[in-house]
Each structure stands twice: as C-alpha cells, then as structure tokens.
Image: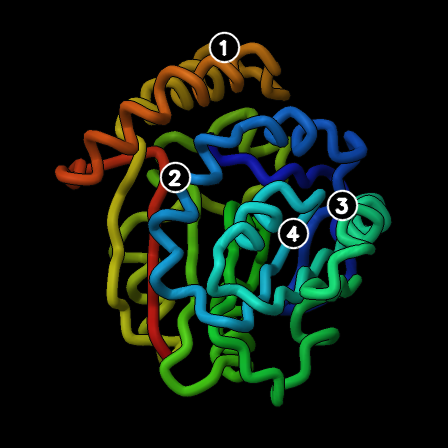
Amino acid sequence: MALRGRAARPAAGAAGEFYEGTQGGRDLEVLADARNYYRWILRQFAPFLGRRVVEIGAGLGNFSRVILSDAGVSEAVLVEPAANLFPRLRERFAGDPRVQTRHGLFEDVIPESMGADSVVLVNVLEHVEDDLGLLRHIRQRLIPGGHVLLFVPALPALFGSIDEVAGHYRRYLKPSLAAQLAEAGFTVERLRYVNLPGTIAWFLIGRVLKWRVFQPGSVQLYDRLVIPLIAALERWWEPPVGQSLIAIARK
C-alpha cells in the first residue's frame, strides 16, 4: 500500500506543493484501519524518532496516532497543508497536550529554529514537485544529528491509475532517492526496498485493473493477512525490489 490521498488541484507553494484531496479524505479513511501497516512502518522508524517529532502531511492522523504510541515521543507537531483535511486532524488531537497541529506548507509553518529530533514523511514526498527543495528545508529544521524518516512508493514501472489519482509526481528508485538525500546534505544511514508482494498487487490494481480508489475490503484483507508475513520475513531478508522504499538519513 502506498497512497496518500491527493488529487486533481494543486495548492499554492514551491518546495511544499501538495494536492488537496477531492475525495474528502475518503482514501485516508479506508487506510485508517490498516493498523498492522502503520505499526510495521513505525518499527523501522522508532529508534530514530527522538523526543520532538514533526510529521509532514499528517492527513487525518492515521500514522500520527502510531507515532504518539512510542514512549520516547514527548512532542509531535503535525503539519497538513490540505484545507479539507486539516480541521479533522486538529479536532482529532485537540485534547492531547503533546500535539501541535499546523495548517500550511512545512517551510511556512515550521521555523528554521525548530530543532526537531526527526521529521517524518509517510507516503508524502512523492506529492511534492520540488522534493529536493523540501528535503533542504527539512534539514534546516533538524537538530545536529537529527533524522529525516521517509516511506515512499518505489519503482517507476509500477506508476499507474491510483498514482495518478493520488497526485503522485513520481515513484522512486534507490539510486534516485539516495542522490536527492545526498544533494540535500544528508548522510543516508538506511535505504531499503520493502513489501515485495505489494509490487504484484500494485501492478494489478494500477496497471491492469486501473482502479482509481482502494476498496476497503481489499485493504483490510491485505493488512490482516499479508502485512504480518511481510514484516516477519523482511525483518531478516532484504528484498531486491519492493512496492515501497524506507530511507533513514541523518543531518
């Protein structure tokens, strides 16, 4: 699974250009119950989160709630530029003293003096036209030794109908993502493909069947049956390719 839920209409901005969801966040609602999926991603990120975390493109807070389950996180700043998603994000975390929600582009609403321990982007960087510019903005707002934690769709050959509807500019290869991170001034500590079975599923739904939205039943089935197997297998074995890439890079 690799869907962020943007479509159709560009929002203003340069390094932080995003797409507002014309489906009112329906796709994010479908993914809200993908608990195994989000916990699996968190296990890759947890050692690098630190105390103060910024999440870019927090959406409806699906991954945000998982970040906040980590005992080491004492402050989370959730950034969401889409006007149709932000009110729901703000309402969801209104009673949590650890959380700040900010509406706008990352570089506009997070000052360079932020001093974040980590900045997290889960299925977000592919929505940004100037991804290199955003990575440079992120680096400026990290403490020395802080990390950017990325989960992005992989393999341009898989680009299909759902990528188009979601407003993806690209899918990444290891070399292209490594080059962008290095040019932005980061040192790559981990970079690996994940979710080998997902390459087949994504090709079928995006290139053959040409779905334009996820079906709730298929997401729940994949999350319940396939993700636990992937998590167990790929913990010990790194696949040569995968539906997604995980990158952990240090300032």
Q: Mark 3 and mark 2: span between their CA atoms?
A: 27 Å
Q: Which residue is mark 3?
A: 20
The answer to whether 234 appears left or right of 43 in the picture is: left
Q: Nearer the viewer, mark 3 or mark 4?
A: 4
Q: Which element is circle 2 on?
A: helix
**Which amino acid, by three-letter code, is at mark 4?**
Ala
Front in this rendered view, residue 46 or 214: 46
* For marks 1 and 4 on the same chain, the one whose residue lies earlier in the sequence: 4
Task: Find residue 164 and report its horizontal and vertical position in percent.
Answer: 58, 33
Q: Nearer the viewer, mark 1 or mark 4?
A: 4
Task: Find residue 128 and report its horizontal and vertical position in percent.
Answer: 58, 56
Q: Mark 3 and mark 4: span between their CA atoms?
A: 13 Å
Q: Are marks 1 and 3 in contact (CB under 8 Å)?
A: no
Q: Which element is circle 4 on?
A: loop
Q: Nearer the viewer, mark 3 or mark 2?
A: 2
Q: Considering only vertical position in the picture, is 179 above or below 24?
A: below
The answer to whether 119 appears left or right of 13 in the picture is: left
* For marks 3 and 4 on the same chain, the one whose residue lies earlier in the sequence: 3
Residue at 52% of width from left, 84% of height from top? 140
Q: Nearer the viewer, mark 1 or mark 2?
A: 2
Front in this rendered view, residue 199 or 97: 97
Q: Which residue is mark 2?
A: 40
**Which amino acid, by three-letter code, is at mark 1?**
Leu
* For marks 3 and 2 on the same chain, the one whose residue lies earlier in the sequence: 3
Q: Which residue is mark 4?
A: 58
Q: Which residue is mark 1?
A: 209
* Number of residues whose C-alpha sits closer than 10 Å to that of mark 2, classed few (under 14), some (14–19) or many (20 or more): some
Task: Find residue 144 and report its horizontal and vertical position in percent.
Answer: 40, 87
* Number of residues whose C-alpha sits closer than 10 Å to that of mark 1, classed few (under 14), some (14–19) or many (20 or more): few
Residue at 53% of width from left, 15% of height from top? 210
Q: Nearer the viewer, mark 4 or mark 2?
A: 2
